[in-house]
């Protein structure tokens, strides 16, 4: 297993290199970062020429990529033109563990820009993922054990309906019902923007109260999809010979369902979850924008529209690395769940 993990990690190196090249070329063609740098428009030709030279934007694209990859000394950037570089002495280059400085946030390190938002995103997304997995397991297992019952048919109809709804439409519905109408009816209503009430402060209760609608919006679509995956996987497992043998031996039903059947039915679920988890780091662009949640999804949308290559590349490469690592973790879980699987 150790040799397999090392081999997979080594295979990931050229893959990450190809991904970084493609993303970097795309970013260079998405806009002019000087147009909105630092929240102001660079109008004077002399100022534009100075910043273009200091940022290395006058170099060929392959040279800019090498600077981003291995580093260079031209990161001593004077954004204000006052003769004092905001990023003096910083040497960017991701191979040196330095993702550079943000072009929009006046020389703030990319790691700090992303780190400040990543905590908020993980708080929101991990809570949503926990709700999704626990709820989908309960619904999926119940539907499999009561196949074609009235409640199973009702669950199927509701899940397909939820799965077909666009995220923004569901968000607007819950905002209208639980915020607008509840306030109109004099009931305790849910907040719709931010992480907390500025007048109260960032307390755990405030954060939890503000998370209700975003978590519900993030969960509804995945909840519907996961429950269908679990239902179909459990139905297949319950019809296997080893389950019939366990029943014939008189094993208790909970042991048959939750140990024998669920463990084997978990393989396809692990695949789906392993594909979804890495994207938690990138946040939910639509949901975070609608609910003004200060996470990485909103950060990505803001900075990609302003051509902030260092921040956007940092976010995208973080997601790419997470996808590879979670796939390796999923393969390890396969071997633990199914003894027939062995890696060399």
Image (tube, rainbow, N blue to C red):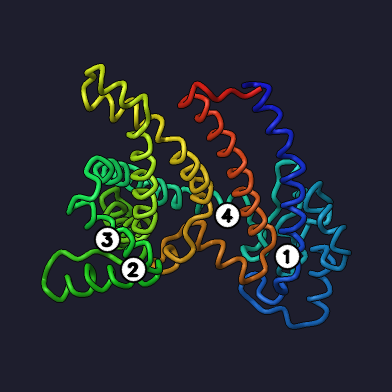
Pick whichever of labels 3 and 1 is earlier in the sequence: 1
Residue closer to the observer: 51 or 167: 167
Indicate left or right for 223 with 150 as reference: right
Pick whichever of labels 2 and 1 is earlier in the sequence: 1
Picture layout, residue 160 above or below residue 340: below
User: Viewer-nearest of labels 3 and 1?
Assistant: 3
Residue closer to the observer: 185 or 73: 185
Disc 3 to disc 1, C-alpha distance: 40 Å
Residue 59 spot, x, y in % from top left: 88, 64
Disc 3 to disc 4, C-alpha distance: 40 Å
Disc 2 to disc 1, C-alpha distance: 32 Å
Label 4 sits on a secondary structure element that is helix
What residue sits right under mark 4 in the picture? 113
Question: Which label was assigned to residue 158?
Answer: 3
User: Viewer-nearest of labels 4 and 2?
Assistant: 2
Check disc 2: other Cα within 10 Å, few if <14, some if 14-19, many if 20+: some
Question: Which label was assigned to residue 26?
Answer: 1
What residue sits right under mark 2 in the picture? 170
Pick whichever of labels 2 and 3 is earlier in the sequence: 3
Residue 278 spot, x, y in % from top left: 53, 46
User: Viewer-nearest of labels 3 and 4?
Assistant: 3
Picture layout, residue 49 above or below residue 16: below
Check disc 4: other Cα within 10 Å, few if <14, some if 14-19, many if 20+: some
Pick whichever of labels 3 and 4 is earlier in the sequence: 4
Check disc 3: other Cα within 10 Å, few if <14, some if 14-19, many if 20+: few
Disc 1 to disc 4, C-alpha distance: 21 Å
User: Viewer-nearest of labels 1 and 4?
Assistant: 1
User: Viewer-nearest of labels 2 and 3?
Assistant: 3
Indicate left or right for 138 with 56 as reference: left
* The quadrant where residue 171 appears: bottom left
Residue 242 spot, x, y in % from top left: 36, 24
Label 3 sits on a secondary structure element that is helix
């Amino acid at each position: 297993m150790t040799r397999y993990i090392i081999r997979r990690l080594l295979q990931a190196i050229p893959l990450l290199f190809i991904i970084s090249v493609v993303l970097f070329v795309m970013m260079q063609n998405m806009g002019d970062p000087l147009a909105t740098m630092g929240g102001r428009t660079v109008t004077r030709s002399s100022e534009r020429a100075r910043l273009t030279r200091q940022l290395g934007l006058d170099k060929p694209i392959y040279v800019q990529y090498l600077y981003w990859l291995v580093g260079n000394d031209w990161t001593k950037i004077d954004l204000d033109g006052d003769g004092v570089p905001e990023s003096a002495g910083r040497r960017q280059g991701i191979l040196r563990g330095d993702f550079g400085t943000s072009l929009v946030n006046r020389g703030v390190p990319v790691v700090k820009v992303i780190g400040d938002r990543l905590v908020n995103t993980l708080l929101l997304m991990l809570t949503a993922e926990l709700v999704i997995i626990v709820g989908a397991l309960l619904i999926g297992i119940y539907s499999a054990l009561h196949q074609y019952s009235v409640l199973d048919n009702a669950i199927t109809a509701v899940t397909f309906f939820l799965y077909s709804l666009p995220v923004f439409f569901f968000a607007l519905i819950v905002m209208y019902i639980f915020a607008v109408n509840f306030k109109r009816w004099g009931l305790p209503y849910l907040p719709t923007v931010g992480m907390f009430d500025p007048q109260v402060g960032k307390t755990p209760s405030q954060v939890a109260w503000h998370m209700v609608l975003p978590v519900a919006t993030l969960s509804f679509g995945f909840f519907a999809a996961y429950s269908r995956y679990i239902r179909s996987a459990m139905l297949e497992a319950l019809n296997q010979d080893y389950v019939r043998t366990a029943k014939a031996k008189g094993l208790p039903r909970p042991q048959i369902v939750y140990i024998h059947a669920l463990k084997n039915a978990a393989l396809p679920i692990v695949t789906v979850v392993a594909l979804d988890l890495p994207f938690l780091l990138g946040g939910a662009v639509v949901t975070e924008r609608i609910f003004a949640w200060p996470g990485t999804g909103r950060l990505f949308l803001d900075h990609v529209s302003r051509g902030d290559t260092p921040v956007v590349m940092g976010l995208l490469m973080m997601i790419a690395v997470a996808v590879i690592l979670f796939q390796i973790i999923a393969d390890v879980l396969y071997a633990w769940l199914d003894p027939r699987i062995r890696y060399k």
